[in-house]
Amino acid sequence: VPEQVDLVQTIRSNRLQLSRLLTRAENGQADAEIAAIYPHTGQAHIIGVTGAPGTGKSTLANALTKHYRSQNRTVAIVAVDPTSPFTGGAILGDRIRMRELSGDIGVFVRSMATRGSLGGLARATGDLVCVFDAAGFDVVLIETVGAGQSEVDIARLAQTTLVIEAPGLGDDVQAIKAGILEIADILVVNKADRPGVDNTVRALRAMLDLGHRVERVNHHGALHTVPAVDSLPDEMTSWQTPILQTISAEDKGIAELADKIAAHRDYLQETGVLKVREQVRIELEMADRLREALLQRLLATTDPTTVQSLIAQVTQRRLSMSEAVTRLLDHTTITP
Ligand SMILES: Nc1nc2c(ncn2[C@@H]2O[C@H](COP(=O)(O)OP(=O)(O)OP(=O)(O)O)[C@@H](O)[C@H]2O)c(=O)[nH]1
Ligand SMILES: [Mg+2]
């Protein structure tokens, strides 16, 4: 279709148009364009960089970017930034990033502030990644503060997820969230120039040995199309999460990290885990979007007074919740 090819070519050759499409995607106003470019995605290596505030995610993303640029690979960075008003760290990281990477045509940085619903943030991030992928960037880095479910949802967009720790912040085992370990494909102890590195590594190793990491394909989506983890062949659960040390501020350990990232990508492709993970992600998102779309349709075809009256009847104990929901569904014809 000529129109699709035009749009792909436009965002590949025109930075202003790319930037404008990113803005529309961020605002959830690019459904038609995303649909048009979607067949041209699936080439980029999507890497998540997550961890507690101040662990050095931005510095590490910059160092990795410089490394990839030295190999002539193009890099897009999506910095999702839910905590910046509190830490200010992202602003600092961004300023350093501006100085080191500005002027390089092979790098594109996009910061995105939290707004609206959390589901909206994960969706907007996914759309930005799609645009960068179609625009031909070899690597897309997604940088998020590892805090809650929304970050886990965002991290799910990545093929390879790095969880960044730093000595002194997370060397207390209690402080290392099992949930974040579960999504880690590679653990990075950054600021390895600081005291306490060995303790942090030891604590992480102990957490890993407790078996907190379960292959992500273990999540059952609501649409029940994903195979159970115990039905997967052994090689699909064979990745051993490595623990690497870096000093991002001095570009130390970055080449080794890039090697591990490449090894993980090979593992994903050779074992077929890449496809299964993508299936899980798409199923989860589809279920989410279906739920939301069905609710919108139901509300659009239902008289608000009907809803109010049903709520009143539940309040007065004249109807149970399940009776009210059944009546609401009976009242409605959910059609486009
Ligand atoms: N000593 C040392 N400091 C580092 C290293 N990497 C980053 N830093 C410093 O740690 C501070 C925080 O770095 P950032 O890269 O902004 O951290 P961040 O995780 O992106 O922070 P938020 O975005 O606020 O969550 C900065 O002052 C960095 O210069 C390192 O390897 N060693
Ligand atoms: Mg940052």
Image (cartoon, rainbow, N blue to C red):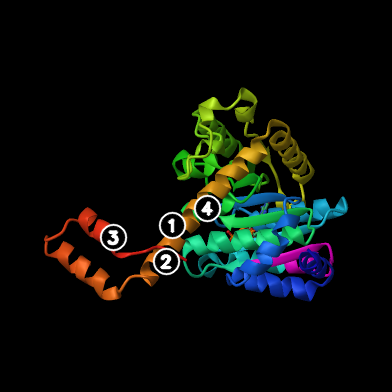
Of the residues under marks 2 and 4, which one precedes in the sequence?
Answer: 4
Report crowding for label 4: few under 14, some 14 to 19, many 20 or more residues within 10 A (C-alpha).
Answer: some
Question: What residue does disc 1 label?
Answer: 291
Does label 3 or label 1 sit earlier along the sequence?
1
Label 1, label 4: how far apart the Cα atoms are:
8 Å
Residue 272 percent location from the top left of the image: 68, 34
Give the amino acid type for the residue marked by disc 2 in the picture: Arg
Q: In which quarter of the image is residue 295?
A: bottom left
User: Which element type, helix, strand or loop, lies under badge 3?
Assistant: helix
Q: Which of marks 3 and 1 is in front?
A: 3
Give how far across and how far down residue 20 sits, in percent: 70, 75
Q: How far apart are marks 2 and 3 (CA)?
A: 14 Å
Dot label at residue 297: 2
Left or right of 317 in this view: 130: right
Tell me the kind of residue under disc 3: Asp
- Marks 3 and 1 close (CB-CB < 8 Å): no
Q: Decide: is 52 above or below 197.
A: below
Question: Mark 2 and 4 residues: CB-CB less than 8 Å, in contact?
Answer: no
Mark 4 element type: helix
Answer yes or no: do the residues labelled 1 and 4 have beta carbons within 8 Å? no
Disc 3 from disc 1: Cα separation: 18 Å
Where does label 3 land, which residue? 330
Read off the residue under disc 4: 286
